[in-house]
Image (spheres, rainbow, N blue to C red):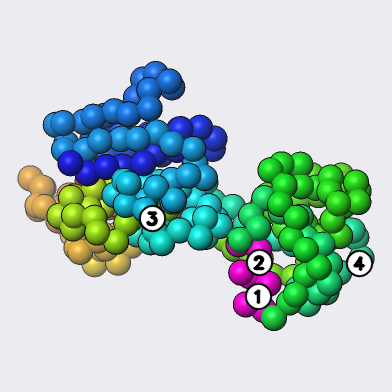
Amino acid sequence: MLRIAVPNKGSLSEPASVMLREAGYRQRRDDRELVLADRDNDAEFFFLRPRDVATYVGEGTVDVGVTGRDLLLDSGSSATEHLPLGFARSTFRFAAPVGTRSEVHDIAGQRVATSYPVLVRDYLAEHGVTPAAVVRLDGAVESSVQLGVADVIADVVETGATLRSAGLEVFGEPLLRSEAVLVRSHDVDSHALEVLTRRIQGVITAREYVLMDYDCPMSAVDQAVKLTPGLESPTVSPLHDRDWCAVRAMVPRSATNRLMDDLYEIGARAIIVTSIHACRL
């Protein structure tokens, strides 16, 4: 039975459970439930603190788990990133009082406050920068400079509004671009992992693509196929009117409206878009 760790709270929790549910696995209905057996899919789920997932996977207590790339790197665990999951994306940046720093080497001899001390120490060591101290804080990192705890911070940056309100600005290159990832232990059963991976990849693809059907004049088929090549090749079927054919192809969801416009321009009609709920490629 494949043992899978799932974050029990926070921004990773709900999206991870939704993805696993879409992949065909049972998920808990009660937030107090800590362990859930899914015997139909030969899997067992353990709902753990997000920061602990990589540690349990690295120790082999569970086989795989969903966590953030940031949490994986900060854990120091031997768990391995297996598959990016495409949600909970974030960017880690250094920030300091406006106009006081411009590059990572300006951090030398400074106190750096962060919720990810291992990640920050490793990054600074990699760039040959020695800070005076890396101060670990569990939250409200932006306030640390104003309160005199640190000179610089390293934290997740989205719009930057919170930093600006604290009189800070980002500088240097991002430390890390993070997202939710599936992590694995070194001795996980390869077949069980392959099944889980294939299911999750099917969910990711279903979210990124739609199925597009349309009628196309035979004279415009070559142009249409160039617009919607599909993953391998589109399906082209004859219609009762031999001057027309029906075309079906998977297309990127983000390009749907542009493609519909382009197809209409070359003469395609009855253009229909359908969501994909699951797939195997």
Callout 2, which amino acid?
Arg
**Residue occupied by mark 1:** 125
Magenta-drawn segment: 119-127
Of tags 4 and 2, the one toward the viewer is 2
Counting residues from the start of the chain, the first of labels 2 and 3 encountered is: 3
User: Secondary structure beneath disc 3?
Assistant: helix
Please tell me in which quadrant of the rendered image residue 266 appears: bottom left
Give residue 121's mark. Answer: 2
Residue 123 lies in magenta, yes or no? yes
Residue 155 is at least partly visible in this image = yes
Q: How far apart in space, not on screen, are marks 4 and 1 (Cα)?
A: 22 Å
The secondary structure type at the circle numbered 1 is helix
> Which residue is drawn at the image coordinates 72% and 47% (left, top)?
137
Q: Mark 3 — residue?
A: 58
Q: Label 4 neighbourhood size at 10 Å, few (<14), some (14-19), many (20+)?
A: some
Q: Secondary structure at mark 4?
A: loop
Q: Camera-side residue: 200 or 138?
A: 138
Foreground pick, 180 / 3: 3
**Residue type, mark 3 in image:** Gly
**Nearest the eye: 230 or 16:** 16
Q: Amino acid at mark 1?
A: Ala
Q: Nearer the viewer, residue 33 or 204?
A: 33
Residue 210 position within the rendered picture, expressed as x and y whole percent measured from the top left: 32, 46
Q: Earlier in the sequence, mark 1 or mark 3?
A: 3
